[in-house]
Amino acid sequence: MIKMVKAGGYANKLGWVNLTEKKIEYREIDENIAYKYIGGRGLGVKLVYDNGPGKDPFSPENILAILVGPLTGTLTPMSSRIVAVTRSPLTGTVTDSHAGGYIGPALKWAGFDGVVLSGKSDQPVYLIAKDGKITIEDASQIWGKDVFTMTSLLKQKHGEVAKVYGIGPAGENLCREANIMHDAGRASGRGGVGAVMGSKKVKALVVIGDEKAISKPANPDKFNEVRERVLKRIIESPVTSPGKGGLSVYGTSVLVNIVNELGAYPTRNAKDTQFEFAFYTSGENLRGTILRETPTCFGCPVHCKRHSEVSDGKYKHKSEGPEYETCWSLGAMIGVGHIEAVSYLNYLCNYYGLDTISVGCTLAMACEATERGLLKDGVRFGDVDGLADMIRKIALREGVGDILAEGTLRAAEKLGDKDLAMTVKSQGIPAYDPRGLRGFIIAYSTSNRGACHLRAYTTSSEILGIPYKTDPLAIEGKVDLVIMLQNLFSVTDSLNVCKFSTFAYKLEDYADLLSSVTGWDINPNELMKIGERIWNLERYYNQLCGFDRKDDKLPRRFYIEPAPSGPAKGWRVDEALFEKIIDEYYEKRGWTKDGKVPEAKLRELGII
Protein backbone atom coordinates (compact mmCIF):
# COMPACT_ATOMS: atom_id res chain seq x y z
CA MET A 1 0.00 0.00 0.00
CA ILE A 2 1.33 3.41 -0.98
CA LYS A 3 0.74 6.03 1.67
CA MET A 4 -0.56 9.29 0.25
CA VAL A 5 1.17 12.25 1.87
CA LYS A 6 -1.13 15.25 1.45
CA ALA A 7 1.66 17.75 2.07
CA GLY A 8 3.80 15.92 -0.44
CA GLY A 9 2.58 17.19 -3.78
CA TYR A 10 -1.15 16.43 -3.69
CA ALA A 11 -3.99 18.58 -2.45
CA ASN A 12 -5.90 15.26 -2.55
CA LYS A 13 -8.95 16.98 -3.94
CA LEU A 14 -10.78 16.95 -7.26
CA GLY A 15 -13.64 19.35 -7.76
CA TRP A 16 -16.24 17.38 -9.73
CA VAL A 17 -18.74 19.80 -11.27
CA ASN A 18 -22.08 18.49 -12.53
CA LEU A 19 -23.07 21.38 -14.79
CA THR A 20 -26.49 19.95 -15.61
CA GLU A 21 -27.59 19.87 -11.99
CA LYS A 22 -25.29 22.70 -10.81
CA LYS A 23 -23.87 20.41 -8.15
CA ILE A 24 -20.26 20.20 -6.96
CA GLU A 25 -18.70 17.17 -5.34
CA TYR A 26 -15.23 17.04 -3.80
CA ARG A 27 -13.45 13.75 -4.33
CA GLU A 28 -10.21 12.40 -2.98
CA ILE A 29 -7.68 10.74 -5.26
CA ASP A 30 -7.27 7.02 -4.77
CA GLU A 31 -3.71 6.45 -3.57
CA ASN A 32 -3.09 3.49 -5.88
CA ILE A 33 -4.37 5.41 -8.91
CA ALA A 34 -2.08 8.32 -8.05
CA TYR A 35 0.91 6.01 -7.83
CA LYS A 36 0.10 4.28 -11.13
CA TYR A 37 -0.80 7.39 -13.16
CA ILE A 38 0.85 10.25 -11.18
CA GLY A 39 -1.42 13.18 -12.11
CA GLY A 40 -1.86 15.60 -15.01
CA ARG A 41 -2.12 13.71 -18.30
CA GLY A 42 -1.95 10.25 -16.75
CA LEU A 43 -4.68 10.85 -14.20
CA GLY A 44 -6.77 12.63 -16.83
CA VAL A 45 -6.59 9.71 -19.23
CA LYS A 46 -7.58 7.36 -16.41
CA LEU A 47 -10.59 9.54 -15.57
CA VAL A 48 -11.70 9.71 -19.22
CA TYR A 49 -11.24 5.94 -19.59
CA ASP A 50 -13.22 5.23 -16.41
CA ASN A 51 -15.98 7.50 -17.71
CA GLY A 52 -16.39 5.06 -20.59
CA PRO A 53 -15.24 5.05 -24.23
CA GLY A 54 -17.26 6.24 -27.18
CA LYS A 55 -18.89 9.30 -25.65
CA ASP A 56 -19.70 11.95 -28.23
CA PRO A 57 -17.17 14.71 -27.50
CA PHE A 58 -19.90 17.36 -27.49
CA SER A 59 -22.33 15.34 -25.38
CA PRO A 60 -22.97 16.10 -21.71
CA GLU A 61 -21.63 12.63 -20.93
CA ASN A 62 -18.11 13.49 -22.11
CA ILE A 63 -15.99 14.89 -19.30
CA LEU A 64 -13.32 17.60 -19.43
CA ALA A 65 -10.66 17.11 -16.76
CA ILE A 66 -8.46 20.12 -15.93
CA LEU A 67 -5.52 18.88 -13.90
CA VAL A 68 -2.09 19.54 -12.45
CA GLY A 69 0.61 17.16 -11.21
CA PRO A 70 2.36 16.51 -7.89
CA LEU A 71 5.30 18.77 -8.78
CA THR A 72 3.00 21.66 -9.75
CA GLY A 73 3.03 24.48 -7.24
CA THR A 74 6.32 23.37 -5.72
CA LEU A 75 9.67 25.06 -6.29
CA THR A 76 10.58 22.47 -8.92
CA PRO A 77 11.98 24.41 -11.90
CA MET A 78 9.90 24.24 -15.09
CA SER A 79 6.87 22.67 -13.35
CA SER A 80 4.13 25.24 -13.90
CA ARG A 81 1.90 23.53 -16.43
CA ILE A 82 -1.79 22.67 -16.52
CA VAL A 83 -3.55 20.16 -18.76
CA ALA A 84 -7.05 19.64 -20.15
CA VAL A 85 -7.94 16.01 -20.93
CA THR A 86 -11.04 14.83 -22.77
CA ARG A 87 -12.23 12.94 -25.83
CA SER A 88 -11.33 15.19 -28.74
CA PRO A 89 -14.02 16.54 -31.08
CA LEU A 90 -11.31 16.92 -33.72
CA THR A 91 -9.76 13.45 -33.66
CA GLY A 92 -12.15 11.23 -31.70
CA THR A 93 -9.17 10.07 -29.63
CA VAL A 94 -8.40 10.82 -26.03
CA THR A 95 -6.46 14.07 -26.04
CA ASP A 96 -4.52 16.16 -23.56
CA SER A 97 -3.61 19.79 -24.11
CA HIS A 98 -1.13 21.68 -21.94
CA ALA A 99 -0.40 25.32 -21.10
CA GLY A 100 2.31 26.99 -19.08
CA GLY A 101 2.25 30.22 -17.11
CA TYR A 102 0.78 30.58 -13.61
CA ILE A 103 -2.62 28.89 -13.76
CA GLY A 104 -1.27 25.45 -12.79
CA PRO A 105 0.46 26.49 -9.56
CA ALA A 106 -2.52 28.72 -8.69
CA LEU A 107 -4.89 25.75 -8.96
CA LYS A 108 -2.76 23.75 -6.53
CA TRP A 109 -2.50 26.70 -4.15
CA ALA A 110 -6.29 27.07 -4.35
CA GLY A 111 -6.50 23.54 -2.93
CA PHE A 112 -7.06 21.36 -5.99
CA ASP A 113 -5.35 18.68 -8.05
CA GLY A 114 -7.99 19.24 -10.67
CA VAL A 115 -11.46 20.31 -11.71
CA VAL A 116 -13.62 17.91 -13.73
CA LEU A 117 -16.51 19.22 -15.81
CA SER A 118 -19.40 16.86 -16.51
CA GLY A 119 -22.86 17.45 -17.93
CA LYS A 120 -23.89 20.68 -19.65
CA SER A 121 -25.15 23.97 -18.28
CA ASP A 122 -28.38 25.39 -19.66
CA GLN A 123 -26.93 28.91 -19.48
CA PRO A 124 -23.39 30.32 -19.86
CA VAL A 125 -21.40 30.03 -16.64
CA TYR A 126 -17.89 30.39 -15.34
CA LEU A 127 -16.29 28.72 -12.35
CA ILE A 128 -14.22 30.08 -9.49
CA ALA A 129 -11.75 27.86 -7.62
CA LYS A 130 -10.59 29.41 -4.34
CA ASP A 131 -9.74 28.19 -0.83
CA GLY A 132 -10.69 24.59 -1.60
CA LYS A 133 -14.13 25.53 -2.87
CA ILE A 134 -15.70 25.92 -6.33
CA THR A 135 -18.57 28.21 -7.16
CA ILE A 136 -20.61 28.49 -10.34
CA GLU A 137 -21.18 32.03 -11.59
CA ASP A 138 -23.34 33.62 -14.30
CA ALA A 139 -21.34 34.25 -17.50
CA SER A 140 -24.04 35.92 -19.57
CA GLN A 141 -22.14 39.24 -19.56
CA ILE A 142 -18.94 37.71 -20.93
CA TRP A 143 -20.37 35.07 -23.26
CA GLY A 144 -19.58 36.11 -26.82
CA LYS A 145 -16.56 38.17 -25.77
CA ASP A 146 -13.14 37.68 -27.28
CA VAL A 147 -10.38 36.13 -25.15
CA PHE A 148 -8.70 39.45 -24.33
CA THR A 149 -11.91 41.17 -23.26
CA MET A 150 -13.09 38.17 -21.26
CA THR A 151 -9.79 37.95 -19.41
CA SER A 152 -9.73 41.67 -18.69
CA LEU A 153 -13.31 41.72 -17.37
CA LEU A 154 -12.74 38.72 -15.10
CA LYS A 155 -9.54 40.20 -13.70
CA GLN A 156 -11.30 43.53 -13.11
CA LYS A 157 -13.97 41.69 -11.14
CA HIS A 158 -11.79 39.25 -9.20
CA GLY A 159 -8.46 41.08 -9.01
CA GLU A 160 -5.15 40.74 -10.80
CA VAL A 161 -4.28 37.77 -8.58
CA ALA A 162 -6.99 35.81 -10.42
CA LYS A 163 -5.76 33.50 -13.17
CA VAL A 164 -8.13 32.96 -16.08
CA TYR A 165 -8.43 29.78 -18.15
CA GLY A 166 -11.18 30.21 -20.70
CA ILE A 167 -12.47 30.24 -24.25
CA GLY A 168 -13.19 32.75 -26.98
CA PRO A 169 -15.87 32.80 -29.70
CA ALA A 170 -14.25 29.80 -31.42
CA GLY A 171 -14.90 27.59 -28.39
CA GLU A 172 -18.43 28.91 -27.98
CA ASN A 173 -19.12 28.13 -31.65
CA LEU A 174 -17.75 24.59 -31.27
CA CYS A 175 -14.92 25.07 -33.76
CA ARG A 176 -13.11 21.76 -33.59
CA GLU A 177 -9.70 23.48 -33.40
CA ALA A 178 -10.59 25.81 -30.49
CA ASN A 179 -8.27 26.46 -27.55
CA ILE A 180 -8.60 27.08 -23.87
CA MET A 181 -6.53 30.23 -23.25
CA HIS A 182 -4.71 31.12 -20.04
CA ASP A 183 -4.60 34.88 -19.32
CA ALA A 184 -5.08 35.55 -23.05
CA GLY A 185 -1.60 34.44 -24.14
CA ARG A 186 -0.92 30.81 -23.18
CA ALA A 187 -2.89 28.08 -24.92
CA SER A 188 -4.11 24.57 -24.28
CA GLY A 189 -4.23 24.26 -28.00
CA ARG A 190 -4.48 20.90 -29.63
CA GLY A 191 -7.47 18.61 -30.03
CA GLY A 192 -10.28 21.13 -29.69
CA VAL A 193 -10.47 21.15 -25.90
CA GLY A 194 -11.89 24.69 -26.07
CA ALA A 195 -14.83 23.40 -28.08
CA VAL A 196 -15.58 20.82 -25.39
CA MET A 197 -15.60 23.58 -22.78
CA GLY A 198 -17.89 25.58 -25.06
CA SER A 199 -20.24 22.65 -25.51
CA LYS A 200 -20.73 22.64 -21.75
CA LYS A 201 -21.51 26.39 -21.76
CA VAL A 202 -18.50 27.13 -19.57
CA LYS A 203 -16.72 30.34 -20.48
CA ALA A 204 -13.84 30.10 -18.03
CA LEU A 205 -12.28 28.69 -14.92
CA VAL A 206 -11.02 31.49 -12.67
CA VAL A 207 -8.42 30.37 -10.14
CA ILE A 208 -7.47 32.39 -7.08
CA GLY A 209 -4.59 30.78 -5.23
CA ASP A 210 -2.26 32.09 -2.55
CA GLU A 211 1.43 31.49 -3.20
CA LYS A 212 1.86 31.21 0.57
CA ALA A 213 0.14 27.83 0.16
CA ILE A 214 3.04 26.55 -1.92
CA SER A 215 3.28 22.77 -1.76
CA LYS A 216 5.81 21.45 0.72
CA PRO A 217 7.84 18.35 -0.18
CA ALA A 218 7.65 15.26 2.00
CA ASN A 219 11.45 15.14 2.16
CA PRO A 220 12.64 18.78 2.09
CA ASP A 221 16.36 18.01 2.37
CA LYS A 222 16.31 15.59 -0.54
CA PHE A 223 14.11 17.91 -2.58
CA ASN A 224 16.44 20.87 -2.08
CA GLU A 225 19.41 18.74 -3.09
CA VAL A 226 17.71 17.56 -6.29
CA ARG A 227 16.42 21.06 -7.05
CA GLU A 228 19.93 22.49 -6.88
CA ARG A 229 21.13 19.68 -9.12
CA VAL A 230 18.55 20.34 -11.84
CA LEU A 231 19.07 24.10 -11.67
CA LYS A 232 22.74 23.47 -12.35
CA ARG A 233 21.83 21.30 -15.32
CA ILE A 234 19.53 24.03 -16.71
CA ILE A 235 22.30 26.62 -16.41
CA GLU A 236 24.87 24.36 -18.05
CA SER A 237 22.68 23.27 -20.98
CA PRO A 238 23.38 25.14 -24.24
CA VAL A 239 19.66 24.90 -24.99
CA THR A 240 18.16 26.16 -21.70
CA SER A 241 20.90 28.29 -20.10
CA PRO A 242 19.32 31.60 -18.96
CA GLY A 243 20.52 34.47 -21.13
CA LYS A 244 22.84 32.19 -23.10
CA GLY A 245 20.93 29.16 -24.41
CA GLY A 246 18.99 29.24 -27.65
CA LEU A 247 15.57 29.14 -25.98
CA SER A 248 16.36 32.06 -23.71
CA VAL A 249 17.95 34.27 -26.37
CA TYR A 250 15.81 33.55 -29.44
CA GLY A 251 12.79 31.70 -28.04
CA THR A 252 11.40 28.51 -29.48
CA SER A 253 11.65 29.90 -33.02
CA VAL A 254 15.43 29.56 -32.77
CA LEU A 255 14.76 26.37 -34.75
CA VAL A 256 13.22 28.03 -37.82
CA ASN A 257 16.44 28.47 -39.80
CA ILE A 258 17.89 25.16 -38.64
CA VAL A 259 14.90 23.05 -39.66
CA ASN A 260 14.51 24.98 -42.90
CA GLU A 261 18.13 24.25 -43.87
CA LEU A 262 17.51 20.56 -43.22
CA GLY A 263 14.70 20.60 -45.77
CA ALA A 264 12.22 19.56 -43.10
CA TYR A 265 10.10 22.74 -42.98
CA PRO A 266 6.68 22.01 -44.53
CA THR A 267 5.88 24.91 -46.82
CA ARG A 268 2.67 25.86 -48.65
CA ASN A 269 0.75 22.85 -47.38
CA ALA A 270 3.90 20.70 -47.45
CA LYS A 271 4.22 20.95 -51.23
CA ASP A 272 7.70 22.29 -50.48
CA THR A 273 10.18 21.43 -47.76
CA GLN A 274 12.02 24.76 -47.55
CA PHE A 275 10.70 28.32 -47.29
CA GLU A 276 12.55 31.06 -49.11
CA PHE A 277 11.50 33.64 -46.49
CA ALA A 278 12.22 31.52 -43.42
CA PHE A 279 14.76 33.94 -41.94
CA TYR A 280 12.20 36.74 -41.84
CA THR A 281 9.95 34.64 -39.59
CA SER A 282 12.76 33.26 -37.42
CA GLY A 283 13.62 33.88 -33.80
CA GLU A 284 16.68 35.83 -34.86
CA ASN A 285 14.61 38.28 -36.91
CA LEU A 286 11.84 38.43 -34.32
CA ARG A 287 14.42 39.42 -31.69
CA GLY A 288 15.70 42.24 -33.88
CA THR A 289 12.32 43.63 -34.90
CA ILE A 290 9.07 43.27 -32.93
CA LEU A 291 10.20 41.58 -29.67
CA ARG A 292 9.41 43.63 -26.57
CA GLU A 293 9.63 41.27 -23.58
CA THR A 294 10.69 37.74 -22.66
CA PRO A 295 8.36 36.68 -19.84
CA THR A 296 8.51 33.34 -18.13
CA CYS A 297 6.37 30.79 -16.32
CA PHE A 298 6.28 30.32 -12.55
CA GLY A 299 9.56 28.96 -11.24
CA CYS A 300 11.29 28.85 -14.63
CA PRO A 301 14.67 30.54 -15.24
CA VAL A 302 14.67 29.91 -19.01
CA HIS A 303 12.40 32.74 -20.26
CA CYS A 304 11.60 31.16 -23.63
CA LYS A 305 8.35 33.11 -24.10
CA ARG A 306 8.08 36.17 -26.32
CA HIS A 307 5.91 39.30 -26.14
CA SER A 308 5.70 41.12 -29.46
CA GLU A 309 4.37 44.47 -30.59
CA VAL A 310 3.76 46.07 -33.96
CA SER A 311 3.34 49.75 -33.13
CA ASP A 312 1.85 51.07 -36.37
CA GLY A 313 0.39 50.05 -39.71
CA LYS A 314 -2.54 47.77 -40.46
CA TYR A 315 -1.02 44.90 -38.48
CA LYS A 316 -0.71 46.98 -35.31
CA HIS A 317 -1.13 44.81 -32.22
CA LYS A 318 0.38 43.52 -28.98
CA SER A 319 0.42 39.81 -28.25
CA GLU A 320 2.27 36.96 -26.63
CA GLY A 321 4.34 34.99 -29.13
CA PRO A 322 4.71 34.00 -31.84
CA GLU A 323 6.36 30.68 -30.97
CA TYR A 324 8.20 28.35 -33.34
CA GLU A 325 5.15 26.33 -34.33
CA THR A 326 3.19 29.50 -35.05
CA CYS A 327 6.02 31.10 -37.02
CA TRP A 328 5.69 28.02 -39.22
CA SER A 329 1.92 27.38 -39.28
CA LEU A 330 1.01 31.02 -39.90
CA GLY A 331 4.19 31.58 -41.91
CA ALA A 332 5.71 29.00 -44.24
CA MET A 333 2.71 26.66 -44.21
CA ILE A 334 0.48 29.40 -45.64
CA GLY A 335 3.18 31.28 -47.56
CA VAL A 336 3.46 34.34 -45.28
CA GLY A 337 7.03 35.62 -45.10
CA HIS A 338 7.21 38.61 -42.79
CA ILE A 339 7.20 38.53 -39.00
CA GLU A 340 4.76 41.42 -38.47
CA ALA A 341 2.06 39.58 -40.43
CA VAL A 342 2.77 36.23 -38.74
CA SER A 343 2.52 37.87 -35.33
CA TYR A 344 -0.73 39.57 -36.32
CA LEU A 345 -2.30 36.29 -37.44
CA ASN A 346 -1.14 34.76 -34.16
CA TYR A 347 -2.82 37.65 -32.33
CA LEU A 348 -6.09 36.93 -34.16
CA CYS A 349 -5.98 33.25 -33.22
CA ASN A 350 -5.42 34.21 -29.57
CA TYR A 351 -8.23 36.80 -29.82
CA TYR A 352 -10.74 34.21 -31.02
CA GLY A 353 -9.26 31.24 -29.13
CA LEU A 354 -7.97 29.05 -31.99
CA ASP A 355 -5.06 26.62 -32.13
CA THR A 356 -2.43 28.15 -34.41
CA ILE A 357 -0.96 24.82 -35.56
CA SER A 358 -4.30 23.30 -36.55
CA VAL A 359 -5.68 26.49 -38.06
CA GLY A 360 -2.49 26.95 -40.09
CA CYS A 361 -2.98 23.46 -41.55
CA THR A 362 -6.64 24.22 -42.28
CA LEU A 363 -5.77 27.51 -43.98
CA ALA A 364 -3.02 25.82 -46.02
CA MET A 365 -5.46 23.18 -47.17
CA ALA A 366 -7.93 25.91 -48.10
CA CYS A 367 -5.23 27.76 -50.08
CA GLU A 368 -4.39 24.66 -52.09
CA ALA A 369 -8.07 23.87 -52.57
CA THR A 370 -8.52 27.41 -53.92
CA GLU A 371 -5.60 26.91 -56.33
CA ARG A 372 -7.20 23.71 -57.60
CA GLY A 373 -10.61 25.29 -58.05
CA LEU A 374 -12.25 23.25 -55.30
CA LEU A 375 -13.01 26.26 -53.13
CA LYS A 376 -14.74 29.27 -54.62
CA ASP A 377 -14.30 32.57 -52.79
CA GLY A 378 -11.37 30.93 -51.05
CA VAL A 379 -7.99 32.26 -50.02
CA ARG A 380 -4.50 32.35 -51.55
CA PHE A 381 -1.09 31.50 -50.15
CA GLY A 382 0.57 34.67 -48.83
CA ASP A 383 -2.60 36.79 -48.89
CA VAL A 384 -2.36 38.09 -45.32
CA ASP A 385 -5.58 40.11 -45.41
CA GLY A 386 -7.53 37.22 -46.89
CA LEU A 387 -6.04 34.79 -44.39
CA ALA A 388 -6.84 37.13 -41.49
CA ASP A 389 -10.45 37.38 -42.65
CA MET A 390 -10.63 33.60 -42.97
CA ILE A 391 -9.52 33.18 -39.32
CA ARG A 392 -12.42 35.43 -38.33
CA LYS A 393 -14.84 33.44 -40.49
CA ILE A 394 -13.66 30.15 -38.95
CA ALA A 395 -14.10 31.42 -35.40
CA LEU A 396 -17.57 32.81 -36.13
CA ARG A 397 -18.55 29.95 -38.49
CA GLU A 398 -19.37 32.50 -41.14
CA GLY A 399 -19.72 31.44 -44.79
CA VAL A 400 -16.98 29.03 -45.86
CA GLY A 401 -15.59 29.37 -42.34
CA ASP A 402 -18.39 27.07 -41.19
CA ILE A 403 -16.84 24.30 -43.29
CA LEU A 404 -13.27 25.04 -42.20
CA ALA A 405 -14.32 25.18 -38.53
CA GLU A 406 -14.87 21.43 -38.74
CA GLY A 407 -11.09 20.95 -38.98
CA THR A 408 -8.65 20.25 -41.78
CA LEU A 409 -9.65 16.71 -42.75
CA ARG A 410 -13.43 17.10 -42.49
CA ALA A 411 -13.23 20.29 -44.53
CA ALA A 412 -10.98 18.70 -47.17
CA GLU A 413 -13.40 15.79 -47.50
CA LYS A 414 -16.30 18.17 -47.95
CA LEU A 415 -14.36 20.10 -50.59
CA GLY A 416 -13.71 16.90 -52.51
CA ASP A 417 -10.09 15.86 -51.86
CA LYS A 418 -9.14 14.47 -48.45
CA ASP A 419 -5.50 14.14 -49.57
CA LEU A 420 -5.16 17.92 -49.30
CA ALA A 421 -5.31 17.50 -45.52
CA MET A 422 -1.88 17.22 -43.88
CA THR A 423 -3.29 15.32 -40.91
CA VAL A 424 -2.87 12.15 -38.89
CA LYS A 425 -6.01 10.95 -37.10
CA SER A 426 -7.63 14.21 -38.29
CA GLN A 427 -5.12 16.46 -36.52
CA GLY A 428 -2.83 18.76 -38.52
CA ILE A 429 0.88 18.09 -38.62
CA PRO A 430 3.29 20.38 -36.76
CA ALA A 431 6.39 22.10 -38.17
CA TYR A 432 8.55 19.11 -39.10
CA ASP A 433 8.44 17.29 -42.43
CA PRO A 434 9.02 13.55 -41.92
CA ARG A 435 10.83 13.33 -45.23
CA GLY A 436 13.65 15.39 -43.72
CA LEU A 437 13.38 14.43 -40.03
CA ARG A 438 12.53 10.75 -40.28
CA GLY A 439 11.88 10.01 -36.63
CA PHE A 440 8.56 11.75 -37.20
CA ILE A 441 7.51 9.03 -39.65
CA ILE A 442 6.92 6.88 -36.58
CA ALA A 443 6.16 9.63 -34.08
CA TYR A 444 3.32 11.16 -36.13
CA SER A 445 1.74 7.93 -37.30
CA THR A 446 1.63 6.24 -33.88
CA SER A 447 0.72 9.31 -31.82
CA ASN A 448 -2.27 8.68 -29.61
CA ARG A 449 -3.68 12.18 -30.10
CA GLY A 450 -3.10 12.63 -33.83
CA ALA A 451 -0.15 14.27 -35.59
CA CYS A 452 2.02 15.73 -32.85
CA HIS A 453 5.66 16.62 -32.19
CA LEU A 454 5.19 16.50 -28.42
CA ARG A 455 4.35 12.81 -28.08
CA ALA A 456 7.93 11.95 -29.13
CA TYR A 457 10.11 14.95 -29.94
CA THR A 458 12.68 13.18 -32.08
CA THR A 459 14.10 16.58 -33.05
CA SER A 460 15.91 16.57 -29.70
CA SER A 461 17.96 13.59 -30.89
CA GLU A 462 18.12 14.32 -34.62
CA ILE A 463 19.16 17.97 -34.27
CA LEU A 464 20.22 18.65 -30.68
CA GLY A 465 21.81 15.29 -29.85
CA ILE A 466 19.64 14.83 -26.72
CA PRO A 467 19.61 12.26 -25.15
CA TYR A 468 21.89 10.94 -27.91
CA LYS A 469 22.60 11.95 -31.50
CA THR A 470 20.91 10.28 -34.44
CA ASP A 471 21.02 11.02 -38.16
CA PRO A 472 17.93 13.01 -39.28
CA LEU A 473 17.86 11.05 -42.56
CA ALA A 474 18.24 7.63 -40.97
CA ILE A 475 15.37 5.32 -40.05
CA GLU A 476 17.33 2.60 -38.29
CA GLY A 477 17.03 2.90 -34.53
CA LYS A 478 14.18 5.39 -34.66
CA VAL A 479 11.54 2.93 -33.41
CA ASP A 480 13.44 2.48 -30.14
CA LEU A 481 13.95 6.24 -29.88
CA VAL A 482 10.25 6.96 -30.41
CA ILE A 483 9.07 4.37 -27.89
CA MET A 484 11.48 5.68 -25.26
CA LEU A 485 10.39 9.29 -25.84
CA GLN A 486 6.69 8.39 -25.86
CA ASN A 487 7.07 6.72 -22.47
CA LEU A 488 9.21 9.54 -21.08
CA PHE A 489 6.86 12.29 -22.21
CA SER A 490 3.90 10.40 -20.78
CA VAL A 491 5.69 10.81 -17.45
CA THR A 492 6.70 14.46 -17.82
CA ASP A 493 3.16 15.36 -18.92
CA SER A 494 1.78 13.60 -15.86
CA LEU A 495 4.23 15.33 -13.54
CA ASN A 496 3.16 18.43 -15.52
CA VAL A 497 6.68 19.67 -16.09
CA CYS A 498 7.71 21.46 -19.25
CA LYS A 499 8.92 19.34 -22.18
CA PHE A 500 11.95 21.63 -22.39
CA SER A 501 13.13 20.25 -19.05
CA THR A 502 14.18 17.15 -21.00
CA PHE A 503 16.90 19.24 -22.67
CA ALA A 504 18.57 19.50 -19.25
CA TYR A 505 17.15 16.96 -16.78
CA LYS A 506 18.17 13.32 -16.56
CA LEU A 507 15.69 10.52 -15.97
CA GLU A 508 16.92 10.05 -12.41
CA ASP A 509 16.15 13.72 -11.73
CA TYR A 510 12.45 13.19 -12.42
CA ALA A 511 12.41 10.06 -10.23
CA ASP A 512 14.21 11.84 -7.39
CA LEU A 513 11.97 14.89 -7.61
CA LEU A 514 8.80 12.79 -7.50
CA SER A 515 10.17 10.68 -4.65
CA SER A 516 11.25 13.66 -2.56
CA VAL A 517 7.98 15.54 -3.08
CA THR A 518 5.58 12.64 -2.47
CA GLY A 519 7.55 10.52 -0.01
CA TRP A 520 7.36 7.55 -2.35
CA ASP A 521 10.42 5.59 -3.38
CA ILE A 522 10.43 5.53 -7.19
CA ASN A 523 13.44 4.67 -9.35
CA PRO A 524 13.94 5.56 -13.04
CA ASN A 525 12.87 2.13 -14.28
CA GLU A 526 9.62 2.30 -12.34
CA LEU A 527 9.00 5.79 -13.70
CA MET A 528 9.37 4.58 -17.29
CA LYS A 529 7.01 1.69 -16.55
CA ILE A 530 4.43 4.26 -15.46
CA GLY A 531 4.97 6.05 -18.77
CA GLU A 532 4.45 2.81 -20.66
CA ARG A 533 1.24 2.19 -18.70
CA ILE A 534 -0.15 5.63 -19.55
CA TRP A 535 0.73 5.25 -23.24
CA ASN A 536 -0.94 1.86 -23.44
CA LEU A 537 -4.07 3.06 -21.62
CA GLU A 538 -4.41 5.86 -24.18
CA ARG A 539 -3.99 3.39 -27.00
CA TYR A 540 -6.51 1.01 -25.42
CA TYR A 541 -9.07 3.79 -24.97
CA ASN A 542 -8.68 4.75 -28.63
CA GLN A 543 -8.95 1.08 -29.57
CA LEU A 544 -12.29 0.88 -27.74
CA CYS A 545 -13.36 3.88 -29.83
CA GLY A 546 -12.56 2.01 -33.06
CA PHE A 547 -8.94 3.01 -33.78
CA ASP A 548 -6.36 0.49 -34.99
CA ARG A 549 -3.64 0.06 -37.62
CA LYS A 550 -5.69 1.70 -40.35
CA ASP A 551 -5.40 5.00 -38.48
CA ASP A 552 -1.61 4.91 -38.07
CA LYS A 553 -0.97 6.55 -41.44
CA LEU A 554 0.83 9.65 -42.68
CA PRO A 555 -0.73 12.18 -45.07
CA ARG A 556 -0.74 10.80 -48.61
CA ARG A 557 1.59 13.53 -49.87
CA PHE A 558 4.54 12.13 -47.92
CA TYR A 559 4.21 8.74 -49.67
CA ILE A 560 3.83 9.94 -53.23
CA GLU A 561 5.70 13.26 -53.49
CA PRO A 562 9.50 13.31 -53.04
CA ALA A 563 11.00 16.17 -51.07
CA PRO A 564 11.63 18.89 -53.68
CA SER A 565 14.69 20.44 -52.01
CA GLY A 566 17.17 20.22 -49.16
CA PRO A 567 19.22 17.24 -47.92
CA ALA A 568 16.23 14.90 -48.41
CA LYS A 569 15.61 16.01 -52.01
CA GLY A 570 14.10 13.23 -54.10
CA TRP A 571 13.15 11.07 -51.10
CA ARG A 572 9.64 10.05 -50.13
CA VAL A 573 8.24 7.61 -47.58
CA ASP A 574 8.12 4.21 -49.27
CA GLU A 575 4.85 2.53 -48.28
CA ALA A 576 6.34 -0.95 -47.99
CA LEU A 577 9.11 0.40 -45.76
CA PHE A 578 6.54 2.26 -43.70
CA GLU A 579 4.53 -0.90 -43.08
CA LYS A 580 7.72 -2.70 -42.03
CA ILE A 581 8.51 0.06 -39.54
CA ILE A 582 5.00 -0.11 -38.10
CA ASP A 583 5.34 -3.89 -37.72
CA GLU A 584 8.57 -3.34 -35.77
CA TYR A 585 6.92 -0.70 -33.58
CA TYR A 586 3.93 -2.92 -32.76
CA GLU A 587 6.16 -5.88 -31.99
CA LYS A 588 8.33 -3.86 -29.60
CA ARG A 589 5.23 -2.44 -27.96
CA GLY A 590 3.86 -5.94 -27.44
CA TRP A 591 0.77 -5.25 -29.54
CA THR A 592 -0.99 -7.31 -32.19
CA LYS A 593 -0.31 -7.01 -35.93
CA ASP A 594 -3.37 -4.81 -36.31
CA GLY A 595 -2.11 -2.43 -33.65
CA LYS A 596 -4.27 -3.48 -30.73
CA VAL A 597 -3.21 -3.76 -27.11
CA PRO A 598 -3.78 -7.40 -26.11
CA GLU A 599 -5.27 -8.39 -22.78
CA ALA A 600 -1.94 -9.87 -21.66
CA LYS A 601 -0.26 -6.47 -22.07
CA LEU A 602 -3.04 -4.72 -20.20
CA ARG A 603 -2.65 -7.16 -17.32
CA GLU A 604 1.14 -6.91 -17.35
CA LEU A 605 0.88 -3.15 -16.89
CA GLY A 606 -1.90 -3.34 -14.32
CA ILE A 607 -4.40 -1.50 -16.50
CA ILE A 608 -7.09 -4.16 -16.03
Image (tube, rainbow, N blue to C red):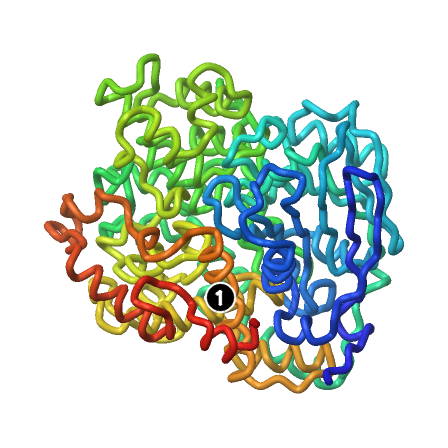
Q: Is residue 13 above or below residue 217?
A: above
In the rendered image, the residue lying farthest to the front is 599
How far from the left and from the top, in percent, is residue 294? 58, 48
**On the image, which quarter does residue 388 sit in?**
top left
How far from the left and from the top, in percent, is residue 58? 59, 37
Residue 78, can we see it?
no
**On the image, which quarter does residue 47 sit in?**
bottom right
Q: Is residue 30 left or right of residue 507?
A: right
Label 1: how many Cα within 10 Å (few below 14, some 14–19, many 20+): many
Residue highlighted by disc 1? 535
Q: Is residue 56 above or below residue 582?
A: above
In the rendered image, the residue lying farthest to the left is 570
For the point 57% across and 79% down, which residue is it?
Answer: 509
How far from the left and from the top, in percent, is residue 486? 44, 66
Please name the amino acid that badge 1 sits on: Trp
Front residue (pair 51, 395): 51
